[in-house]
Amino acid sequence: MAKRAGFDNIELHLVRVLHVLITERSVSRAALKLQSTQPVVSAQLKRLRELTGDPLLVRAGNDMAPTQTALALTEPALHLLNQAERLFSPRARSHGFEPATCETVFRVAASDYLDPLFLPELVARVQRLAPQATLELHSLSGEFDYRRSLASGAVDLVIGNWLEPPGELHLGRLLSDEVVCLVADDHPVARMGTRSWTVQKYLECEHVAPMPLHPGARGVIDEHLTAQGLARHIAVRSSHFSLIPLMVAQSLLVLTTGRLFCSRYVESLPVSIVRCPVAFPPMDYYQLWHDLTHASASMRWLREQVKEVAAALSSRGAPRRLASRRPG
C-alpha cells in the first residue's frame, strides 16, 4: 500500500526531472535547465531513487552515468511528457487532430425523426474522411438516459429535437423544419383536401406517434398540444419511427412530424403530405454535448460533420415530385 501511495503522489514535474537528469547526466546541469537549484534537484533525485528502487545515476570518473534502468526509463518518460503536452496545451488540442489517420471511437445517440437519410449520410461522410475511426450509433429511447450518458462520457453527442433542450448541455442548432401531416393517398383528408379539416377533426383522427424518449415525456407534438389545452387520439405508439410511414400507407393513421422526414417517402409509398390544421411552431433539431467533450479537437470535428450533413440535407429539401402532390 505504501508503494501505491508513493506512486499516486508522483507529480508530472518529477517525470520531467527524471528525463532531464538522465539526458544531462549531471545534477548541476539539470538544475540549470530546470531553472532550479542543485539541492532541490538532489532531493528530487533521492526521491526518484526511492520510487524506482534504482540509483539511476552513478559515478563514472568525474562524471555521472545513467544505469540500465535509467536508460530504459528515458523513452517512457519522454512519451508521457509529450502526451501531457497534448493533453494540457490548447494549441495541441486544437491542431493535433488528423481525421485521415485518427482511430477515435465516436459515440453518437440520435433519433431517426430528423431525416431517414441523415444517419446513413453521416456514416458515409465519417467513413470517407476518417476511415480508421469507429462510429457507434445509439438510438434514443425511454430506457436511454442521454443526459447521464453525456455526463459520464458513455456517448459524445446526442442528436434530436426538443422544445426546450436541457440547460446544462452545450447545443448547436442543426435545422428548423415545418410541421406537417403524412397520410395515406386514400385517406379522406388527402382525397378531399384540408379545407374542411378543422382542429377538432384533426384531434379526433387516429394518430400514430413515437414512443417517449424518457419516462414522463410526451414528445414535442403532444407537449405543444397540451400547452394549448388540446389532446389528440393516439391509436398507435411505435419505437420504430422509420417504419411509421409504412403503417400510414396501409391505414387511416395520421403522422404529425417534420416535412423533411415525410418528404423522403412520397415517391416510394402511396402517401401524401397535407397541411396540419393546428399551428405548430417549427420543429427544431439540435446536437447536444457535455463539457467533457467541449474542447476536444476530435469532437469539434465530429460536430462540424454533423452540422454539414444536416445543412446539405436541408438545402436539398423535398423531392421535386412533391410539388405534384395535393398541396393540402
Image (cartoon, rainbow, N blue to C red):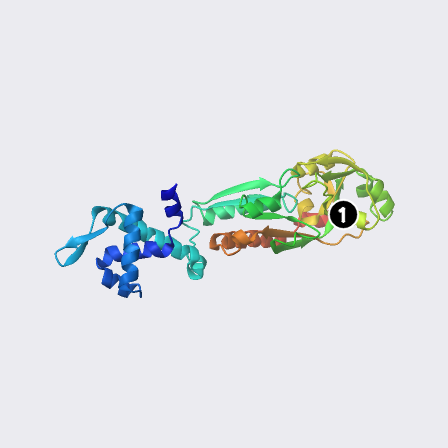
Looking at the image, residue 119 sits to the left or right of residue 270; the answer is left
Q: What percent of the width, then of the height, locates residue 310?
A: 59, 52
Using a 10 Å C-alpha cutoff, classify the residue at mark 1 as few (fewer than 14 neighbours), some (14 to 19) or many (20 or more): some
Q: Is residue 4 visible?
A: yes
Going 50% across and 56% down the picture, which residue do you hit?
Answer: 295
Quadrant housing residue 167:
bottom right
Q: Where is residue 255 shown, x and y percent of the image?
A: 74, 41
Provide the residue designation for mark 1: 223
Quick check: 60 left or right of 97?
left
Numbered label tally: 1
Residue 161 drawn at (x, y percent): 67, 49
| Near-viewer residue (91 or 265) | 91
Give residue 205's position: percent from left, percent from top.
82, 39
Q: Does residue 121 appear anywhere in the picture?
A: no
| Residue lying farthest to the left in this orientation | 61
For residue 179, side relative to residue 202 (left or right): left
Nearest the viewer among 208 and 275 is: 208
Q: Secondary structure at mark 1?
A: helix
Q: What's under tag 1, amino acid-wise?
A: Glu
On screen, residue 32 above or below 138: below
* Rendered-image quadrant of the N terminus: top left
